[in-house]
Image: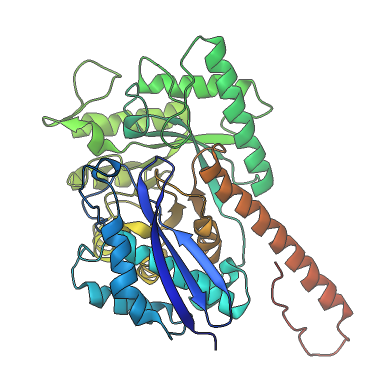
Amino acid sequence: MPAIQGVYAREILDSRGIPTVECTIWLDTGGIVATSVPTGTSIGKFEALELRDQDESRYVGKGVTKAVNNVNREIAPKLVGQDPTKQTEIDQMIIELDGTENKSRLGANAIMAVSQAILKAGALSQGTPLYYYVQKKFGFTQPLTIPKCIYTIINGGEHGAGNLDIQEFQVIPASHIDFENSLNLAVNMFHKLEEVLIIKGAIHSIGLVGGFTPNLFSNTDAFEILIETTKATPYTFGQDLFFGIDASASSFYSDGKYKLKDRSEGYSSTELLDYYKNIKDLYHVFYIEDPFREDDIKSWQQLTKDIGETTRIIGDSLLATNKIKTTEAIANKTCNSILVKPNQVGTISETVEVIRIARQAGWEITVSHRSGETNDDLIADFAVGVGADSVKFGPPNRGERSAKYNRLLQINDEIKRWKTTQATASKKTAPEPKPAPTPTPTT
């Protein structure tokens, strides 16, 4: 069995020009893997803690040399000689080495970098694609498929330019559209949106994660622009595509009110709930993420009760990919879906545990990128391997986002070829009561 020969971390930059951690693992077979950790802008208070240097002379205080040193000096020596397929055991060892509830001593960014690298090393040691390794390693039994994609094409809130309060406006292709056609739809919408904004003389600059940040008068104007854009494409609104939002409501809450540009006075929790119901009916918004601040539990519960049968109410900052918070939300019927971001909790095995809990409750699973991304496409393989219902990787724009979609295209092609191979092998099998062997998927 291959063993870990060396581990090394270093500081690199994410898509925002902010440092993050990259980790490389060498196996004694000569194999090498490398991975890097995404970082967030809208960071929930329940997330595991990234370790930053706080040295204002380097990278405006956001350097990660402390986290890097913790990998190289504390974690790495304990991994040499370890079996890289022992994901859960290694993750637990590092958690115990850290010794804090929120991974603040070693840093969640340090721990996550190593956990991701272990996952890649395990797949390499088995000679299998990463998505297939994830599925088999953690015992997921669903057929390998590409999750549905949620495409953010307008940025507001902390991801925008201060013009819109809602953080993301999303295009969601209908379920009957397969992945390749879904990506084609998103690309069409993205470029047509730019044309519409130019024609209107509106700002068409790009936000933090690659979506447009138009200068509109209200948040509902964004939906009107998207409907107008849809009319300029071959697609039909309400038939081929629908809308979703990431409200990130904590970011526009102050002085006891939720403050949106849609009216001069702020919204109470009840008024904001009615606002969501209204945009659901008017604009086919059936995906609403973080509709209220984390402590406004009664409003979460009421919204889920009122429209949860037909609308996905998604917990992101509310849940923070945290086992305890997710279990509480299930018991209290606070929401009905979860946004999964592995770096929120800090290890691969803990992320998988949260996914199992949510799945057992009948929740839908959306695996997500972060605003500070790298070109690492591990998250695409992970989403396929765990059988996520959907993924959220941003717009089909900018290298760090397109890397994930390009990886999904590659996986999609591999799955198709694998199924063709299975079908061919089945036809060649002699007509006797003996099942044809299942081939390993090829890369």
Question: Can residue 345 be seen by looking at this rendering?
Answer: no
Residue 185 in percent (x, y) is at 64, 36
The residue under the point 62% across, 69% down is: 129
Vertical relation: 380 (above or below) 241: below
Horizontal side of residue 111 vs 211, given as left or right: left
Q: Quadrant of residue 311?
A: top left
Horizontal relation, residue 422 to residue 397: left or right? right
As drawn, 98 above or below 251: below
Task: Check the image and name the residue furthest to the left.
Answer: 255
How are the residues colored?
rainbow
| Quadrant of the image occupied by residue 426 | bottom right
Whole-percent x, y for residue 390 in the image = 51, 52
Q: In this rendering, does residue 376 appear at all? A: yes
Query: Looking at the figure, which quarter contains the N terminus?
Result: bottom right
Closest to the observer: 288 or 405?
405
The residue lying at 57 percent from left, 68 percent from top is 130
Residue nearest the viewer, comparing 91 with 269: 91
The answer to whether residue 317 is above or below residue 121 is above
Q: Is residue 85 above or below residue 13?
A: below
In which quadrant of the rendered view does residue 428 lie? bottom right
| Residue 225 percent across, percent down from the top left | 50, 20
The C terminus sits in image quarter: bottom right
Rendered residue at 27%/64% (across/down): 327
Q: Is residue 68 left or right of residue 117?
A: left
Residue 217 picture location, percent across and down: 36, 14
**Residue at 30%, 19% in the rendered image:** 262
